[in-house]
Image (cartoon, helix red, strand yellow):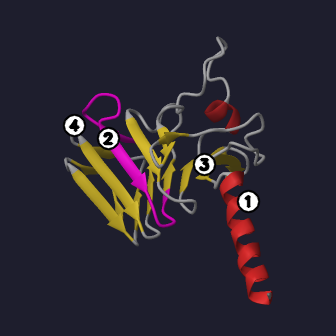
Amino acid sequence: MTARNISGFNEVSVDASGVTLTGGMSFNLSSTASLSLVNGASLNSTFVSNGGGAGALTITLDGGSTLTLGGNGNPLNNAVVDLLDFDSLLQFSAETIDSFLFFASPSGEQGEHFGKITFQGDDLIFGSDPFAFEAGDNALATEFNGGSGVQIQAIPEPAITLLGGLGLLALVRRRRV
């Protein structure tokens, strides 16, 4: 679906389809709202916003879905995005990795999106190198759009992956005995 503007709803769910807002338009929902992208759905918008205060708009991504925001500055506005699986992506096509992760201002503040993006309700954790998978990390940042954009993806914790691998080895060993 291609649209110029979507506004005034309390709850929107996009299931296994895509929505593209053209002409720099945005996704504007009512004061307390939720937006769910599921089963490989995608939404491309300049900004997402609503009339409520901080955290009044909740966006969930599940089942390999993608939210792409093309506005610079603060395209999430007061929204909170929760990644529910390891296959979903949150993309900022007009923000560099430095403006997203590190210091948004000379005073050394964290990037403006920290605290607005979670994985299954928990804060994102990037180690000392956001491009590398490190123990304790639950997210990975990668550049896209020729380096002028950043995408965020949740990743399984190494300990969970290790335990899964050990369990698989135990099954293989048991079958051989």
Left or right of 66: which side holds 11? left
From the viewer's side, name the closer residue of 170 and 22. 170
The relative height of residue 107 versus residue 70 in the rendered view (above or below) is above
Helix, strand or loop at mark 1: helix
Residue 27 marker: none
Q: Amino acid at mark 1?
A: Leu
Quadrant holding the N terminus: bottom left
Tell me, yes or no, whether the two marked residues, 3 and 4, touch with CB atoms within 8 Å. no
* Residue 31 - label: 4
Question: Which is in the foreground here, disc 3 or disc 1?
Answer: 1
- Pointer 2 or 1: first along the chain: 2
Q: Amino acid at mark 4?
A: Ser
Q: Are marks 4 and 2 in contact (CB under 8 Å)?
A: no
Q: Residues within 10 Å of mark 4 (few under 14, many from 20)?
A: some
Q: Residue 48 location, x and y as percent? A: 38, 43
Q: Is residue 119 visible?
A: yes
Q: Amino acid at mark 3?
A: Ile
Could you classify mark 1 by the number of other residues whose Cα lies within 10 Å: few (under 14), some (14-19), or many (20 or more)?
few
Question: Which mark, by number, is residue 162?
Answer: 1
Q: Which residue is mark 2?
A: 57
Residue highlighted by disc 3: 152
Magenta-colored span: 47-66
Q: In the picture, residue 76 is in which quadrant?
A: top left
Q: Element under label 2?
A: strand
| Residue 50 placement (x, y as % from top left) | 28, 38
Spatial CA span between label 2 and label 3: 19 Å
Residue drawn where x is 69% and y is 69% of the image = 167
